[in-house]
Image: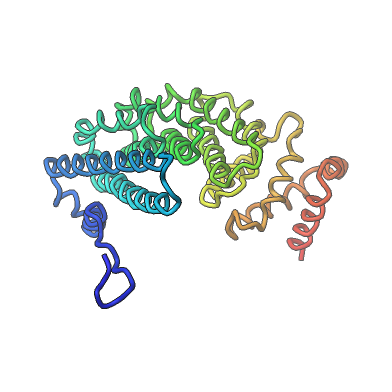
Amino acid sequence: PFSSSSSSPSPPPPSPPFRIQKCIQMAKPLGRKCINQDALEIIGKALLNLLGKSMQKIENLEKRKMRKDIDEEAVEKLDMKAEQEDHLSFMAADCIGTLIKSHRQAFLGTFDKLGRAIMLMLHPSRTALTRKYAVFIIDDLIEFIGADSGKYFRKIIPPLLRYAKDKDPALQQACVYGLAVSAEHGGETFNNYVNQSLKTLGEAITTNRKIPNATDDVKSATDNAISAFAKTCKFRGSRIDLSKALPAFLHWLPLEVDESEAGNVYSIFCSLVESNNKHLLGENMNFLPQVVKILVMVCGTTMIDQNMTGRMMRLVVNINKRIPKNALQALKARLPGPVKEKMAKILAHCNK
């Protein structure tokens, strides 16, 4: 609405999901006492209903845009309405996530009641946007409830695996994140899905990397899939063939755009190098040039913080000191010119 005293639009009132979320966040530990099981179910159902209606409005708006007689101005107005509904949908899904975070295991009873509606949102006939918001809720369930969420894995893991290779990068990213938190927090039940998860992630990464002129959204989804792959190797290493998985992981580095995942990925990478992992370094250290190349390329970039830069620089120095001179010369001979130049600068800086 517009104010009669000003030509500037007044800010819209906060949405109900926003208000609920803020109340829960402000209540913090008291949230569980303020919202009992009955109230939790009522709020959850109301938010899910709101999310469903908002998704339906977006679908209807998209259909209206397809009309042949529609003009550019009308399309712009419909896009604006769709953006508002999308924000409302995000707030509703995020608010359900906030309830999961605040109530943890106490939310399981509510999910028993809401689960069927959420699974319907994951049906292939629904839009990628609708499926994405359903995955957001599932991701929070696994991450913040942990092993106890395993009772639902038979129903919720297959959609994550299916849509982890979806053409929509936002949906794909939400799903690979779900597989990552499953590997870390999913308990023993996820062991049944580890190899299929690793295979799916590898296929998603390989397919995305073949896309010509990939958008940043696709690159971000790819980076998240690499992060999920790395976490699966870290947390489920006893369940997979690391002699095949870790060389593949090394081959996919460096990440391209997602700074938020870079810290996790390169921490895992550095730990493997520091422990002289035979699968990452290869037989007779055959993969050492690629390892050094990644360390040198990533050092000092905006993808990592100063602590990680220091850690990587120390690894470069240690490798330079520890391997025999002839082996070092052979290693450097396999490095591209720019990498050799940057490596020399790193060594010079550290030897000051």
The number of numbered badges drawn on the structure is 0
Q: 41 above or below 155?
A: below
As drawn, is 317 to the left or to the right of 252? right
Q: Which residue extends farthest front?
A: 69
Q: In which quarter of the image is the C terminus?
A: bottom right
User: Which residue is at the far bottom?
Assistant: 5
344 relative position to 193: left or right: right
**The one of 310 and 133 positioned closer to us in this rendering:** 133
Q: Quadrant of the N terminus?
A: bottom left
Q: Residue at x 19, y 43 (%)?
A: 46
Query: Can you give x and y, in whole percent of width and height, for residue 162 in the image?
Result: 45, 26
Instruction: Tell me what residue is drawn at x 25 percent, y 41 percent.
Output: 53
**79 or 117: nearer the eye?**
79
Task: Please tell me which residue is depicted at 22% across the width and 33% down the height of the picture.
Answer: 114
Q: In this view, does 193 lie above or below 30?
A: above
Image coordinates for residue 196, horizontal then vertical, percent = 49, 23
Q: Which colour scheme is used?
A: rainbow
Q: Dividing the picture into quarters, in which one does residue 51 lie?
A: top left
Q: Could you say where residue 269 lies in the image, as x and y percent from the top left? A: 61, 42
Q: Residue 276 vs residue 204: left or right?
A: right
Q: At which x and y percent is residue 340?
A: 81, 51
Left or right: residue 350 versus residue 1 is right
